[in-house]
């Protein structure tokens, strides 16, 4: 009886892990064979109108610094600020700052929503407004808690000399991030760069991303789900243009300082990505999308199939231990005994690595395993949240991240 759940456990883990290893091998080949894809085709920005899209909600703590940081870019641009019914002084502080700096932007528009409906709804409303006005050639969306490095807009606009480029993203530089976030970010960024070098990456950072306003329709956004950035990137690629990450462009923002807050952030983000992947499941089977269909298929595995398989492995392990409790330890020098001993050692090791990773502790060269297991836990929790009918597209801010970021800037 011990052998059957042991086989199920081993098979589930193997099926969960193998696509990750295959993707890692392919990433190495993509980076090696398509390194030229990491550089824009021109040294000059494209001559197109640019609008900065700034969604805000209760950002009084950061809004003045954000406006100053955005205005410091070397590219003339317009500003479209959309407020999701803030209850603090965000709008008043914005208007006061803009009145004192009338030269900061070519033009300024402020849209006010009557009620808070989530960021995706705000972004869709702002994009619909831009589509109707037909004034913007390019849109750069940036979050209030993200500070852009110098010359960011200039560098990103160089990519659009290539008519096949639909959207360009920047990489995050998380200040004072916990160890597990730093480890996760390193591998996540490497994946994005490799995917965008060979074709496109479906996931970008909404804190700083630029796209052609005509590359997608605002009506394609699911306003009842978050991950609006990934939605935009994926839809742009499905409409026929590429989505790339520029490895030389970055932004800085804060990161939750406590484990529970960081897990809350990741579960929310995971739910948005999972909903997107389910919604666009058919695209992963569309051979006309080339390598991108493979990327989508693997991301579906990484975010949905793999955590479910890990859940099967955990249940199988518990079932095996239940049989041991009922019938006793297998006889010495039997197959069941050898299998159980081997799995017991492996399970103990994985539990330790998982716990250390979620506690923000390094396990040296084995940290990646612990981080993977911790990620699977959060993805499973996100799937459970969705199964319970709970949507996380409207969330409370991580105040500790904002306060820590501001304190370290002063």
Image: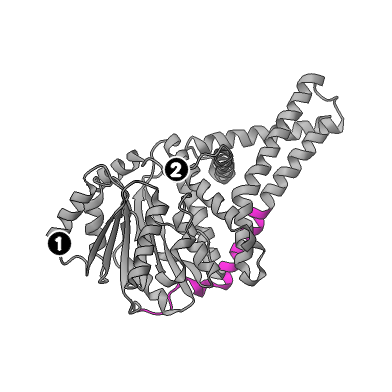
Label 1 element class = loop
Tell me, yes or no, if residue 207 can be seen here.
no
Nearer to the camera, 390 or 211: 390
Label 2 element class = helix
Range drawn in magenta: 19-43
Q: Is residue 346 above or below residue 177?
A: above
Q: Position of residue 112 (x, y in %)?
A: 28, 53
Residue drawn at x 49%, y 55% as measured from the top left: 222
Q: Position of residue 202 (x, y in %)?
A: 53, 61
Q: Quadrant of residue 72?
A: bottom left
Identify the image quadrant of the N terminus: top right
Residue drawn at x 66%, y 38% as measured from the top left: 311
Nearer to the camera, 186 or 209: 209
Residue drawn at x 68%, y 47% as measured from the top left: 16
Mark 2 or 1, nearer chain start: 1
Q: Quadrant of residue 381?
A: top right
Left or right: 171 in relation to 95: right
The numbered mark at residue 265 is 2
Residue drawn at x 51%, y 37% as measured from the top left: 358
Q: Position of residue 19 (x, y in %)?
A: 67, 54
Q: Position of residue 345 (x, y in %)?
A: 70, 33
Cα gap from disc 2 to disc 1, whole angstroms = 34 Å
State yes or no: residue 34 in magenta.
yes
Left or right: 89 in relation to 271: left
Nearer to the camera, 198 or 27: 198
Q: Main secondary structure of the magenta part?
A: helix
The numbered mark at residue 101 is 1
Report the residue that reaches farthest toward the left: 100
Q: Is residue 345 above or below residue 303?
A: above
State yes or no: residue 341 in magenta.
no
Q: How many marks?
A: 2
Left or right: 123 in relation to 11: left
């Amino acid at each position: 009886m011990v052998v059957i759940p042991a086989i199920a456990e081993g098979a589930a883990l193997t099926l969960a892990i193998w696509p990750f290893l295959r993707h890692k091998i392919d990433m190495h080949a993509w980076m090696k064979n398509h390194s030229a894809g990491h550089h824009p085709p021109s040294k000059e920005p494209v001559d197109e109108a640019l609008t900065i899209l700034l969604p805000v909600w209760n950002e009084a703590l950061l809004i003045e610094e954000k406006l100053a940081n955005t205005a410091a870019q070397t590219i003339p641009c317009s500003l479209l600020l959309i407020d999701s019914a803030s209850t603090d002084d965000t709008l008043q502080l914005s208007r006061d700052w803009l009145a004192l700096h009338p030269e900061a932007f070519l033009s300024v528009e402020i849209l006010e929503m009557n009620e808070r409906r989530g960021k995706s709804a705000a972004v869709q409303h702002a994009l619909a407004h831009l589509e109707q006005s037909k004034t913007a050639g390019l849109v750069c969306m940036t979050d209030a808690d993200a500070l852009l490095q110098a010359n960011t807009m200039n560098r990103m606009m160089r990519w659009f000399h290539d008519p096949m480029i639909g959207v360009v993203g920047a990489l995050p530089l998380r200040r004072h991030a916990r160890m597990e976030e730093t480890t996760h970010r390193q591998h996540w960024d490497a994946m994005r760069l490799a995917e965008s070098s060979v074709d496109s990456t479906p996931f970008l950072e909404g804190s700083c991303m630029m796209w052609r306003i005509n590359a997608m329709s605002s009506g394609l956004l699911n306003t009842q789900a978050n991950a609006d950035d990934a939605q935009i990137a994926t839809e742009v690629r499905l409409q026929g243009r590429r989505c790339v990450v520029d490895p030389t462009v970055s932004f800085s923002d804060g990161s939750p300082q406590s484990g529970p807050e960081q897990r809350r952030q990741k579960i929310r983000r995971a739910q948005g990505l999972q909903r997107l992947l389910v919604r666009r499941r058919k695209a992963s089977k569309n051979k006309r999308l080339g390598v991108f269909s493979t990327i989508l298929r693997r991301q579906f595995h990484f975010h949905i199939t793999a955590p479910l398989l890990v859940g099967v492995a955990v249940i199988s392990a518990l079932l095996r231990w239940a049989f041991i409790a009922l019938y006793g330890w297998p006889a010495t020098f039997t197959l069941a005994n050898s299998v159980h001993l081997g799995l017991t050692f492996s399970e103990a090791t994985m539990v330790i690595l998982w716990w250390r990773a979620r506690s923000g502790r390094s396990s040296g060269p084995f940290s990646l395993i612990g981080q993977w297991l911790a990620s699977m836990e959060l993805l499973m929790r996100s799937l459970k949240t969705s199964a319970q009918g709970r949507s996380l597209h409207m969330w409370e801010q991580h105040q500790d991240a904002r306060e820590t970021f501001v304190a370290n800037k002063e």
